[in-house]
């Protein structure tokens, strides 16, 4: 699905990432653990094309992509979900439909896919609630629905259960478990032991700029 032979990211006076060959296969779910500040979020943002880095040998779906250049297809097919997702001050349905509308998906198809995403994420009954009044767990489920509705080839999830507990955390984990069972390609940065130990999850640990297969 997505592979690079070398990735380096540094800031003035500090080398943050110095990775060798790494990739996520089609239908593979991977989790990256590591201390705060180890570079997990930065790595996801680089792979999403949101932050620059020195990348050699980038290959997407078997096709070489010029170093440090993200193709239109890659930008459309790889979706990054922030641990504190931003929701527009519109309706929940319009938040979920935003990417589809930006891509010019016809209205009828857009409405159908948004309806399916609302049902999948369990937020249909919250459709009339202003986004700013949603809880952290509800916002994360809307963000996952907004990602899934785009039918990406790769999900990049940054600490999806951070600061959640109880039922809210369980609901988000249940959605991610479904994505894994559907053979979605995922790369998740997290500390959550339950997510880390989901069946079928490939595990990595980021330490001193290196990714270790655990």
Image (cartoon, grey):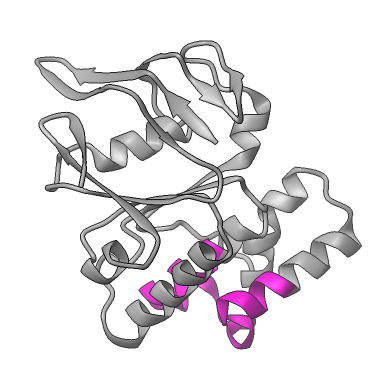
Q: Is residue 117 visible?
A: yes
Q: Residue at x 67, y 30 (%)?
A: 73
> Which sits in the foreground, 26 or 48?
26
Prevailing SS of the magenta stretch: helix
69 horizontally vs 44: left or right: right
Task: State whether residue 167 is above or below residue 56.
Answer: below
Q: Which residues are magenta?
A: 116-144
Q: Quick check: 203 left or right of 59?
A: left
Does residue 132 show up magenta in the picture? yes
The percent position of residue 139, horizontal first and vertical second, equals 46, 70
Residue shown at 18%/30% (left/top)? 210
In the image, is 92 to the left or to the right of 16? Answer: right
**Residue 5, position in %: x, y?**
38, 18
* Magenta-span inclusion, residue 43: no
Image x and y of residue 98, in percent: 68, 54
Looking at the picture, tell me which residue is in the foreground, 61 or 123: 61
Q: Quadrant of residue 145?
A: bottom right
Please tell me which residue is depicted at 58% across the width and 56% down the height of the picture: 147
Locate residue 103: give its quadrant: top right
Q: Residue at x 54, y 11 (%)?
A: 66
Question: Residue 114, relative to residue 106: is it above or below?
Answer: below
């Amino acid at each position: 699905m997505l592979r690079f032979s070398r990735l380096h990211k540094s800031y003035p006076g500090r080398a943050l990432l110095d990775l060798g060959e790494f990739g996520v296969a089609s239908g593979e779910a991977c989790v990256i653990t590591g201390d705060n500040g180890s570079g997990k979020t930065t790595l996801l943002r680089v792979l999403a094309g949101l932050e620059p880095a020195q990348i050699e040998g980038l290959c997407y779906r078997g096709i070489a992509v010029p170093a440090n250049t993200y193709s239109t297809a890659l930008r459309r097919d790889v979706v990054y979900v922030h641990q504190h997702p931003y929701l527009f001050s519109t309706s929940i349905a319009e938040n979920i439909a935003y990417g589809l509308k930006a891509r010019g998906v016809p209205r009828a198809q857009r409405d159908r896919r948004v309806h399916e995403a609302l049902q999948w994420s369990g937020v249909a009954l919250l459709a009339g609630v202003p986004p700013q009044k949603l809880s952290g767990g509800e916002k994360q489920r809307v963000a996952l629905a907004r990602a899934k509705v785009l039918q990406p080839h790769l999900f990049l999830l940054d600490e999806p259960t951070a600061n959640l507990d109880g039922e809210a955390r369980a609901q988000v984990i249940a959605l991610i478990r479904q994505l894994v069972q559907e053979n979605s390609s995922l790369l998740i940065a997290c500390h959550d032991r339950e997510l880390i130990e989901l069946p079928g999850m490939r595990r990595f640990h980021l330490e001193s700029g290196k990714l270790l297969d655990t």
